[in-house]
Image (tube, grey):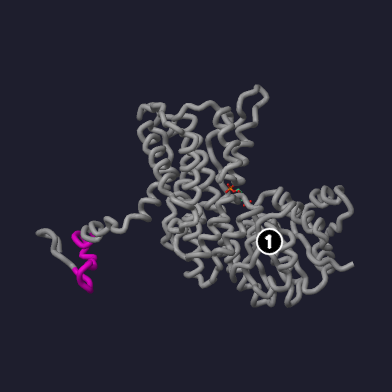
Amino acid sequence: KEFEIAVYGLGVMGSSLGKNLISKGFRTALFGKSEEERQKFQAQGEFAVFSTEEEMVNSLKRPRVLFMMVTSGDVVDRVIESLLPLLDEGDILIDGGNSHFKDTQRRYHALLEKGIEFLGVGVSGGEKGALTGPSMMVGGSEKAWVSCGHILEKMAARIGNEYCCSYLGKEGAGHYVKMVHNGIEYAMIQIIADFYSVMKEGLTLSHQEIMEMFTRWKHTELNSYLVDITAGVLAIKDTDGTPLVEKILDVAQQKGTGSWTLEEAVARGVYVPTISEAVFARYFSKDTQLRKEGSRVLHATTKPITLDNYEEKLKDALYLAMIVSYAQGIALIQKASEDYGWEIDLPLAVSLWREGCIIRSELLQHITKALKESEKNILLSQSFGDLGKREQALRQISAKAIEAGIPVPTLLSVVSYYDSCRTEKMNVNLVQALRDCFGAHTYERTDREGSFHTVWMEGEE
Ligand code: 6PG
């Protein structure tokens, strides 16, 4: 029997993707380096688990399709190295891990030289998504996509007859879009956490009230995976009956994709303040000593706030904050696509997030529509109705949080982004003047062409 595809790596994600493929009717060969993982998988049914790479590769029909699901980083290079002697020209290697797009770019070119078609696929949705249908952002060899795309599509989540899986561009385009997906994921998670602070510390709502509010929001325009799991997480009690979340140490971890997004935003010169604040909130959370001393020396006091019709206002503000998070990430993808020459179809890329992934939401339907209508920043689209009411709510909540002394960095970043986008004339004319004053860096004028320098003060050249 010839297998159509192999899954290399039987960790949590690899096993789930393997089972997903089998459930969709694909003849799937499986391989894991660890004996324990192989046995664990084998014990679950009649699966074709191979114990050597050679046997696994030889079981595949040609061109062979191998889906690697291993830890990102050096491991991917080692696996590629050990597989290369076993592969023939035209065979397809797929990396489904959270690889850095630059690594994918390097591997894509190196493998192309050897006649191997390489795909870097961003897979989102965690263990459950991998098992039932993740969102898959594909980049790399277009030839490989034409040949095995139908298998990947069937693995993925779907909306009606549309698959949340598509080819987005050459080199690292797929992993890039997945990286930005994660940057947006960081932003939205921190936004929810900042709203939680406003509700808990500011409005002094009880845990039960907060949980019920998120539960109600699941059935509104805020309908999204992250709001859904927030309600679920808040409902969980510890053995003593108190909310488990309140016992969790306030130090956040990360595996790197959020920071990569930020590094890329700096490299591309794209303004992503909410992603930035979310990434730094995780770093800053590690400095528990500073916060402990700071709360004493800087006199921590949180004044309760009052806000009429607060549930509606919180909902409106959260909706706008979500739009702004997507807007920042999408602007980054747009710029990267231009800079790297990937020609990413933006509405298509964003439409892949509508199901299966962590940042899926009802809102993404409108965003996809907005992008189809115009290539400009989605904030400028009319697809979300009048943002004015939402803006007022966000502004009011942010101002109250500032007065109360509650840190809500992502909320403030959303206000800054929004206001920056609607301010026609920025204040950097003064920045230019100062640069010219101390360094003769020159400036341009609004009323004349050319480059100008002024001796602004005596003693400055
Ligand atoms: C996904 C997630 C996933 C990521 C986790 C953890 O789309 O399924 O983005 O790929 O690994 O969310 O990321 P951090 O450990 O960096 O929070």
Q: Is residue 215 above or below residue 24?
A: above
Residue to which mark 1 is pinned: 163
Q: Quadrant of residue 437?
A: bottom left
Can see residue 387? yes
Q: Is residue 98 above or below residue 412?
A: below
Residue 395 in the figure: left or right of residue 275:
left
Q: From the top left corner, tell me how far across and down residue 326 is, in percent.
A: 51, 54
Q: Residue at x 51, y 62 (%)?
A: 371
Q: Is residue 158 above or below residue 111?
A: above
Q: Nearer the viewer, residue 53 or 356?
A: 356
Q: From the top left corner, tell me how far across and down residue 348 is, in percent.
A: 59, 64
**Crowding near pointer 1: few (<14 within 10 Å), some, many (20+)?**
many
| Chief secondary structure of the magenta portion | loop
Image quarter in which the C terminus is found: bottom left
Q: From the top left corner, tell me how far across and down residue 17 is, in percent.
A: 74, 55
Residue extending farthest to the left is 458
Q: Is mark 1 within 8 Å of ligand 1?
A: no
Can see residue 120? no
Magenta residues?
435-452
Residue 388 magenta-drawn?
no
Image quarter in which the N terminus is found: bottom right
Tag 1: amino acid: Tyr
Residue 108 in the figure: left or right of residue 152:
left
Q: From the top left corner, tell me how far across and down residue 443 is, in percent.
A: 23, 66
Q: Residue at x 14, y 60 (%)?
A: 456
Q: Secondary structure at mark 1?
A: strand
